[in-house]
Image: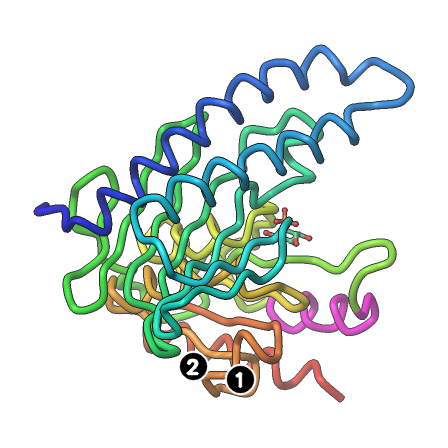
Amino acid sequence: MQRSAVLNVMIGAARKAARGLKRDFGEIEQLQVSLKGPANFVTAADRRAEDILYAELSKARPGYGFLGEEGGSREGADKSHRWIVDPLDGTTNFLHGIPQFCISIGLERDGTMVAGLIYNPITDDLFLAERGKGAFFNDKRIRVAGRKTLADAVIACGLPHRGRGDLALGLREIGAVQDKVAGLRRFGAAALDLAYVAAGRTDGYWERNIKPWDIAAGLLMVREAGGFVTDLEGHDAMFAKGDVVAGNEAIHRDLLAALKTAKA
Ligand code: LIP
């Protein structure tokens, strides 16, 4: 693939932040057995990664706004452009020494996502997308899977957990989907879940209670791979509502319909 200047900026920033995350992840394995656990250590790793991403991205594109999981929103002189960044998506996995986490960088122009990067520093999986130019996995073009029925589909989801989300609704949704599909998965990093749909590894995905930085890059990734992504009402308000459903056209439609039956 021909990498544009902006993708090169994003890749450079992600690789630099990833070096620290990789080193810190190595430490985590040692900390699992300690009573206090690695929670504070992980928070510090998360912050360090965001600081690197902020420094690198704003050095290359001074003036762009920045919305990050750790540092919140920072206005820029350029009101059209905004980075939407999760320095460590899949924090709980990272904390437990599970190598399913990533850096997610989205670039928004006038309210539309125009570029996205999702990078797992451990597996070296690099997913890229640019509006109108397609989605790529390690430089190869990717497309959403072609399976047309839920019966053949492997679907990923996010689950509510202690202190977060509507547990009863979560159970009803799982019940509504589980008996229609070939398999359900819960990987624990929303950005990678969307990248996997884009790459055809999974056929669909849904989750509630997520933040813009979890999904900004992934939304573009799925669309550029020929997929569909909406909120759980079937509209485009994923950031505002904090929920998302993705798949190819048929899987997206049928998954949305199955999830609706769980609402009442
Ligand atoms: C995580 C999401 C994941 C969700 C977790 C958490 P974080 O983001 O990617 O899908 O289920 O609860 O929100 O907090 O690791 O950036």
Residue beneath label 1, please? 257
CA separation, marks 1 and 2? 6 Å
Colour scheme in use: rainbow
Quarter in which the C terminus is drawn: bottom right
- Say what secondary structure mark 2 lies in: helix
- The front one of 71 and 201 is 71
Main secondary structure found in the magenta portion? helix
Label 1: how many residues lie within 10 Å, few (<14), some (14-19) or many (20+)? some
Q: Which residues are magenta?
A: 166-177
Q: Are marks 1 and 2 in contact (CB under 8 Å)?
A: yes
Give the amino acid at mark 1.
Ala
Residue beneath label 2, please? 253
Classify residue 47 by image quadrant: top right
Residue 138 higher or lower than 165, as above or below: above
Give the amino acid at mark 2.
Arg
Magenta stretch: includes residue 97: no
